[in-house]
Image (cartoon, rainbow, N blue to C red):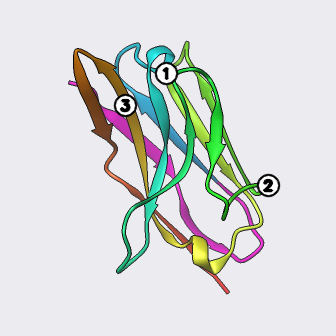
Amino acid sequence: QVQLVESGGGLVQAGGSLSLSCAASGNIFSRSAIGWYRQAQGKQRELVAVITSGGNTNYADSVKGRFTLSRDIHKNTMDLQMSSLKPEDTAVYYCNVRWVLLREYNYWGQGTQVTVSS
C-alpha cells in the first residue's frame, strides 16, 4: 500500500507564492506518473501538473508559467512551486501517483488547502 503525505499550502495574498510537497512511501516515483490535482468548491477535480513516467512535465493552461513541478526520485518526493497566485487558484490540492503493471495503480494524498485572498 502506497502512502502519500502532503505538506505546505495555507493562506496567501494574490500575487504571492506557496510551495507544496508530497512524499511517498516506497520507491515508486521512477516508474510512475506523478502530479498534483486540485478541486475547488463545487467544481470537479482537475489536473494541475504532472510528470509522466517518461519524464515529461505537463501543466494545465491556467498555471503555465506560474507553477513548477519537480521531483526527486531518490527521495521519493515531489514539489509544486506556485507563484503569482490568483484567487481562482484557491482549492484543495491532491498529490497523485499512478502506474500500470498488469493493472492500474492509482493513489491519492489526503489533500491540502490552498487559499488565495484578493
What span is in magenta? Answer: 1-18
Say whether residue 32 is left or right of residue 107: right
Mark 1 or 3, closer to the camera: 3
Q: Does the magenta stretch include residue 2?
A: yes
- Badge 2 local density, few (<14 within 10 Å), some, or many (20+)? few
For label 3, the residue is 98
Estimate the x, y position of residue 15 in percent, counting from the top left. 77, 72
Estimate the x, y position of residue 12 in percent, counting from the top left. 64, 71
For label 2, the residue is 65
> From the image, which quarter does the C terminus lie in?
bottom right
- Residue at point 32% right, 21% down? 100
Q: SS of the residue at dot 3?
A: strand
For label 1, the residue is 76
- The answer to which quarter of the image holds residue 21 is top right
- Residue at point 72% right, 61% down? 17
* Placement of 21 over or under 74, stated as above or below: below
Say whether residue 91 is left or right of residue 43: right
Q: Tell me the kind of residue under disc 2.
A: Gly
Q: SS of the residue at dot 2?
A: loop
Q: Does the magenta stretch include residue 25?
A: no
Mark positioned earlier in the residue sequence (1 or 3): 1
> From the image, which quarter does the N terminus lie in?
top left
Using the numbered discs, state the Cα–Cα distance from disc 1 to disc 2 in whole angstroms: 25 Å
Say whether residue 58 is left or right of residue 10: right
Mark positioned earlier in the residue sequence (1 or 2): 2
Mark positioned earlier in the residue sequence (2 or 3): 2
Using the numbered discs, state the Cα–Cα distance from disc 2 to disc 3 in whole angstroms: 25 Å
Estimate the x, y position of residue 26 in percent, counting from the top left. 35, 16
- Residue at point 50% right, 15% down? 30
Mark 1 or 2, closer to the camera: 2
Mark 1 touches mark 2? (CB < 8 Å): no
